[in-house]
Amino acid sequence: MKVLSVTSHVCFGHVGAQASVLPLQRLGHDVCLVPTVLLSNHPGYGGLGGGPVKLVRLDDLMQNLIERGLLAQCGAAHSGYLGQPGTAAIARRGIDGLRAARPEAPYLCDPVFGDNGRLYVPEGVVDDIRTQLLPVADIATPNAFELSVLSGLPCDDPGQALAACRALQSQGPGTVVCTSAAVTETEVAIVAATREAAFVAWVPRFAVAPNGTGDAFAAILLGRLLNGVGFEQALAWAAAAVHGLIAASVELGDSELALIEAQHEIVAPTLDVTVERIT
């Protein structure tokens, strides 16, 4: 099915849409991309050009998709990096427009706004995500820092992350996945909570990982769920696939996610990840 995706676009590299569109396509889902920012590259290169898409232009794009009934062809929605206050309201209008035609359409909110203890968007973006998008989300995929900010709780270990996931569920999403709930020297824990159960998956840790892994994870998780598999299998698949993409990047010595060279990992991950039910 087609997926409405509201997220960033870079000319060079694999973050934002450049990390999420291909995985969705390889899993069989076309993408209707509404770019929130247009950048030359991600900030890791020491500088960048471009910036947020003007809200009036973004609104015009979304309004025309709605007026022409094109969003009715989408069966799911996804949002990622928003970049500026006001973007979430436009994304919400698109999600509402899609669900007017398909009320059952799932929406995954990837609240991309910070990591490692710092925000990299204006604080108004966080407030917009909390008030505009989380209340209508089915799934949220924050990292530990984002989960802590949104829930108001610490996320320093899997137990704390689970409590924070449960707290975030009260804001709307029935399923919350924390993509970095704990980090040891050798492993990273992913903690997930549905309304019925909670899960943890441990995957091998790399000392250095490319940017865009969270974008790819969210896309692969959504893509597999849209393919009709159960949540535990989709979670294991997404974790394994991203691990394979990182491993290929490290092997190539590339600071960018090796989406092209290792795209086979998206459809047939090499690693076998075990998802353990913890409640």
Image (tube, helix red, strand yellow):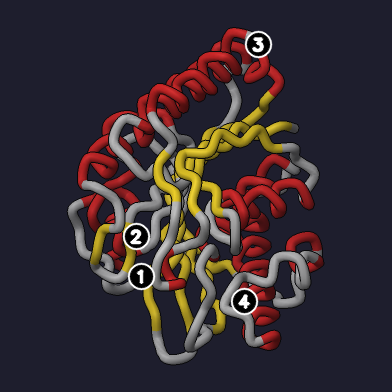
Tag 3 secondary structure: loop
Q: Nearer the viewer, residue 24 or 227?
A: 24
Task: Tell which tag, 4 or 1, sits nearer the viewer.
Answer: 4
Q: Label 3 vs label 2: CA separation?
A: 40 Å
Q: Nearer the viewer, residue 129 or 55?
A: 55
Q: Label 1 vs label 2: CA separation?
A: 6 Å
* Circle 1 residue: 158
* Circle 2 residue: 162
Whole-percent x, y for residue 101 in the image: 61, 12
* Circle 3 residue: 69
Question: Please, which residue is most extreme toward the front here?
Answer: 49
Whole-percent x, y for residue 196 in the image: 47, 45
Q: Label 4 vs label 2: CA separation?
A: 25 Å
Q: Is residue 41 left or right of residue 158?
A: right
Q: Nearer the viewer, residue 20 or 189?
A: 20
Q: Label 1 vs label 3: CA separation?
A: 43 Å
Q: Mark 2 and mark 3 in contact (Cβ < 8 Å)? A: no
Q: Label 4 vs label 1: CA separation?
A: 23 Å
Q: Residue at x 35, y 70 (%)?
A: 158
Whole-percent x, y for residue 41 in the image: 51, 61
Q: Mark 1 and mark 4 in contact (Cβ < 8 Å)? A: no
Q: Earlier in the sequence, mark 4 or mark 3?
A: 3
- Of the numbered discs in the image, which one, if any, rests on residue 246? 4
Instruction: Give amino acid for label 1.
Output: Pro
Q: Earlier in the sequence, mark 4 or mark 2?
A: 2
Q: Mark 2 and mark 1 in contact (Cβ < 8 Å)? A: yes
Q: Quadrant of the C terminus?
A: bottom left
Q: Residue at x 60, y 61 (%)?
A: 12
Task: Tell which tag, 1 or 3, sits nearer the viewer.
Answer: 3
